[in-house]
Image (spheres, rainbow, N blue to C red):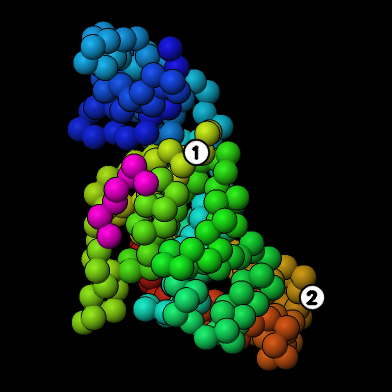
């Protein structure tokens, strides 16, 4: 029979078989011999060893549509990045780090701003404008009032989605809404640190409807400066694309060069100030990291 790996812990793989339930599995030794590791999200064939105890062996991994390394997972359709509009407030620098990490793994990101009930309307419009103008699909919701939850559910329907974001933004609360059986522990927000306590400990898929899975991302780190060359960074800012090739210098990185069309666009608010400032900050971080790389 075939199913999907929804969790992997200490050499055990938990495989969801539609209509039958979840089997606790070990992987056949041939995988280890061939250097193949089953991943959460893999569609697999299993052989039942103890039907009463729901135990089986993973005997074959079906072809993967894709795989990512951080977190290690397979067959992911999209990334839903969750940020809060208040407590904590959004930061373009933080948002962009998560976007870059997902874009680097060739995942299509959707931005979801939670805690809409706590934010002023103008603040909501501001953040929606910044990222819709940059070309991203962007939604707002409230895990408390339920506003926007229907639209978020439509985005998730029929797909396997990674949910990621900084601590304290309500990610676990949203997962509990879409997959109540997850019963995830929701961490209180630390007043001292202004962020939530880490409550998730392993990568796991949760069923949120027919052919719909959501994955939390424990230990997920946003983009770090050591991961990239500074010349690459501009390719992760879609709103820069219309200006590429129009600067005075070929290979312009849009920082200090004269006659730079991206700088001009930022100065005239055709590129949002928050995004350009985030770009400059990340560029300097990468530049500093490069000094210590070799």
Q: Residue at x 59, y 51 (%)?
A: 155
Q: Is residue 57 left or right of residue 169?
A: left
Q: Residue furthest front?
A: 145
x, y percent for residue 221? 36, 59
x, y percent for residue 13? 29, 27
Q: Residue at x 44, y 20 (%)?
A: 19
Q: Depth check: 66 or 188 in front?
A: 188
Which label was assigned to residue 233? none
x, y percent for residue 85? 47, 77
Label 2, label 1: how far apart the Cα atoms are: 48 Å
Name above or below for residue 229 compared with residue 1: below
Is 181 in the magenta? yes
Residue indicated by mark 1? 209
x, y percent for residue 145? 46, 68
Q: Quadrant of the C terminus?
A: bottom left
Residue indicated by mark 2? 246
- Category of crowding for the residue at label 1, using alpha-carbon neighbours closer than 10 angstroms: few (below 14), some (14–19), many (at least 20): some
Residue 115 shows in this picture = yes
Span of residues in magenta: 180-186
């Amino acid at each position: 029979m075939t199913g999907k790996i929804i969790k992997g812990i200490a050499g055990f793989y938990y495989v969801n078989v539609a209509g039958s339930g979840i089997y606790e599995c070990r992987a056949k030794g041939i995988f280890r011999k061939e250097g193949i590791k089953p991943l959460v999200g893999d569609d697999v064939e299993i052989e039942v060893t103890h039907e009463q105890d729901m135990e089986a062996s993973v005997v074959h991994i079906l072809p993967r549509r894709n795989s990512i390394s951080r977190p290690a997972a397979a067959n992911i359709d999209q990334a839903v990045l969750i940020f809060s509009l208040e407590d904590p407030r959004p930061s373009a620098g933080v948002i962009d780090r998560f976007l870059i990490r997902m874009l680097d793994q060739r995942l299509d990101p959707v931005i979801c701003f939670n805690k809409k009930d706590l934010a002023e309307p103008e603040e909501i419009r501001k953040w929606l404008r910044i990222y819709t103008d940059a070309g991203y699909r962007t939604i707002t919701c409230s895990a408390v009032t339920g506003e926007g939850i229907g639209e978020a559910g439509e985005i998730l329907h029929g797909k396997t989605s990674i949910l990621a974001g900084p601590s304290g933004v309500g990610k676990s609360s949203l997962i509990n809404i879409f997959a109540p059986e997850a019963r995830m522990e929701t961490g209180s927000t630390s007043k001292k640190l202004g962020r939530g306590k880490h409550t998730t400990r392993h990568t796991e898929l949760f069923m949120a409807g027919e052919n719909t899975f959501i994955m939390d991302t424990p230990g997920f780190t946003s983009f770090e400066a050591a991961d990239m060359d500074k010349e690459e960074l501009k390719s992760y800012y879609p709103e820069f694309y219309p200006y590429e090739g129009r600067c005075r210098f070929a290979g312009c990185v849009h920082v200090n060069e004269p006659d730079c069309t991206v700088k001009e666009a930022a100065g005239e608010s055709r590129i949002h100030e928050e995004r350009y400032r985030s770009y400059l900050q990340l560029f300097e971080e990468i530049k500093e990291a490069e000094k210590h790389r070799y």
